[in-house]
Structure formats: C-alpha cells, structure tokens
Image (cartoon, helix red, strand yellow):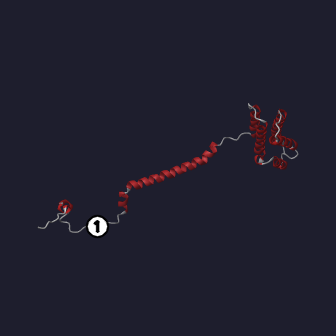
Amino acid sequence: MMKVFFNPIVSKSYLLEANRQIDNTVPIFKSFSQLIEENLFPIATIILLFLASVIIYFLIRKKKKTGTTLDEPPPTDPYEDALQNIEKLQSQRPSLSPKPYVFRLSEILRIYVERVFQVPAMELTGEEFMKEIASHAFFRNRYDKILQEFIDQGDQIKYSKESADDGEMKQLLHTALHFVKDTHAKLLADETSPS
C-alpha cells in the first residue's frame, strides 16, 4: 500500500477560493490623493516639526539681536572707576605687599588712560607707554615728568629685590591720584572752554 501524504494547507478550505480563476494584480502606482490619505500622520508630523523649527530659529535670532543690547551694563565713568579702585586699594586690609600693590596701582592708572584717551596702555611696556603718551595731543608738554617718575619708581619696586618702604608707596599713590584728578579737571576745562 502506498501512503499518500496529506498537505494540511490544501485541506483548509477557507485558504482557497474555489471559484477564483485568475489572480488580480495589486496596482504598483497609487494616485497622489491615495498616498496622502495613507500617510497623513507622518506628513503632518514632518510639517509641524518644520514649522516649529522655523519659529524657534526666528525667535532665537530676534533674542540675539535685542538681547545683546539689553544685557550690556551702562558704561561707567572712567574717572569715577579709577578713584573708586584707588580708594579700594588704599583701604584694603590686610594691605598688599609692595610689588602686588604697585602692579595693581599701575593697572588702575593704565586702564584709566586707555578708557579716557584710547591709548592701548595695558599692552605696552613702560617705555612704549611713555612714547605713546608723548605722541598723544592731550599729553604734549603735560605730565611727561610725573608719568616718567611714576613708571621708573614703580618699575624699581616691581623688579627690585629690595623691599619698598611705606613712604615710596604713599608717593606712588599720591602721584596716581594727582594724575587722575588733574587730567580729569583739564579735560573738563577743555570741554567748557570755547575753541
């Protein structure tokens, strides 16, 4: 006897349509409206993400334009800043040792000159600073001696192995204060005097 293998898939009648003679092909191309209908959620998501990113971009750009002007503090008066910094240095407790004291006092003076007279004082050595000052219209025949003494005495304290005494420190402070106050007074007098 011969055994016949029975195929279980063929025996299930619901899998086969007996009256179907030809397979209909599934269309490869769909109409545009059909594609839109079938993919409506992903398309809407992409459009919303694009619109949100455009809005965020323009908001950030607008904030950068307006934010830079709002975040900047109003400019302060260089004269007032110099006086306050000199007073802070003078009243600092414990007081600084001579070398840091002279470095700070020199820095205050140079920042004042840089802000008021637009001279790049912070990047210059003492000698270069004096040359730059000598070529400035405001300083011609003014303050040459006082600035030269301040720089020489300050350099001597900064780069000497010997310790400076209190008298030298007070003299430097007095010179810096005199320079700031006197230049400010002369600038005010130049502004108010008719040309």
From the image, which quarter does the C terminus lie in?
top right
Residue furthest toward the left? 1
Please give the name of the residue rendered at 52% of the width and 49% of the height, measured from the top-left corner.
56
Label 1 environment density (alpha carbons within 10 Å; few <14, some 14–19, many ≥20): few
Please give the name of the residue rendered at 79% of the width and 36% of the height, measured from the top-left corner.
98
Relative to the observer, which residue lies in front, 113 or 76? 113
Asked if 128 appears above or below 100 in the picture, the reply is: below
Number of numbered discs on residues:
1
Please give the name of the residue rendered at 47% of the width and 54% of the height, measured from the top-left corner.
50
Disc 1: which residue = 25
Relative to the observer, which residue lies in front, 31 or 92? 92
- Quick one: SS at disc 1? loop
Relative to the observer, which residue lies in front, 5 or 107? 5
Instruction: Give how far across and how far down residue 33 sits, in percent.
Output: 36, 60
Instruction: Give how far across and how far down residue 145 sits, in percent.
Output: 88, 43
Residue kind at label 1, given as amino acid type: Thr
